[in-house]
Amino acid sequence: MCIQRLPTADAFWLLVTLCERLVPEYYSRTMVGAVIDQKVFEQIVSEYLPEISQHLNKIGVDLHLLSVPWFVCLFLNAVPLASAPRILDGVFFEGPRFVHIQHFTMECVTGTALTQRVRAAGCSDGA
């Protein structure tokens, strides 16, 4: 929760550092940084959460359609507001790999987040 204790100008420059150094190319025109991290995440899900990967493949839904928003927002859109400063602290202290750790942890803990998003979008295989 370091960012909450910083003066406004310092918090601003910390966020500039986040965007330019810790998650480079996430917020560029091509979003290549987010795309690369998404590909890594797809591999992780395929290896460690095969049932989710198989279900999404079966119904024809690309994982990136569901999880890119989490990456671009650094999960701040998927957690309670009180958790956001802790996530930012993790990114600042651990660097970009924290993004993958956070994403994978969220999937393991909830176990159904992606499946719920698929069902909410009206995409199911009827099973």
Image (tube, helix red, strand yellow):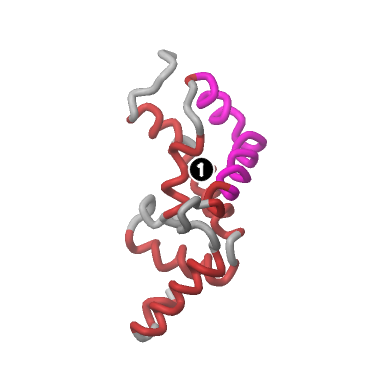
Queried whether the magenta region covers residue 118, the answer comes back as: no
Q: Residue furthest right?
A: 47
| Dominant secondary-structure state across the stretch colored magenta | helix
Give the x, y percent position of residue 68. 46, 45
Quadrant position of the C terminus in the picture: top left
State the residue in front, 35 or 57: 35
**For the point 50% across and 57% down, which residue is it?**
26
Give the x, y percent position of residue 36. 59, 48
Q: Residues within 10 Å of mark 1 (few under 14, many from 20)?
A: some
The quarter holding residue 84 reads bottom left
**For the point 58% across and 54% down, which residue is it?**
101
What's under tag 1, amino acid-wise? Answer: Glu
User: Is 102 rendered above or below residue 24?
Assistant: above
Circle 1 sits on which residue? 107
User: Is 125 rendered above or below residue 18?
Assistant: above
The quarter holding residue 16 reads bottom left
Q: Residue furthest front?
A: 29
User: Is 13 rendered above or below residue 47?
Assistant: below
State the residue in front, 39 or 120: 39
The quarter holding residue 116 reads top left
Horizontally, is 59 left or right of 33 in the view?
Answer: left
Q: What residue span does the magenta drawing correspond to?
A: 36-58
Queried whether the magenta region covers residue 45, the answer comes back as: yes
Q: Residue furthest top?
A: 126
Number of residue marks: 1
SS under mark 1: helix
Quadrant position of the N terminus in the picture: bottom left
**For the point 60% across and 42% down, which residue is it?**
39
**For the point 40% across and 29% down, which residue is it?**
118
Give the x, y percent position of residue 51. 57, 27
Give the x, y percent position of residue 37. 58, 50
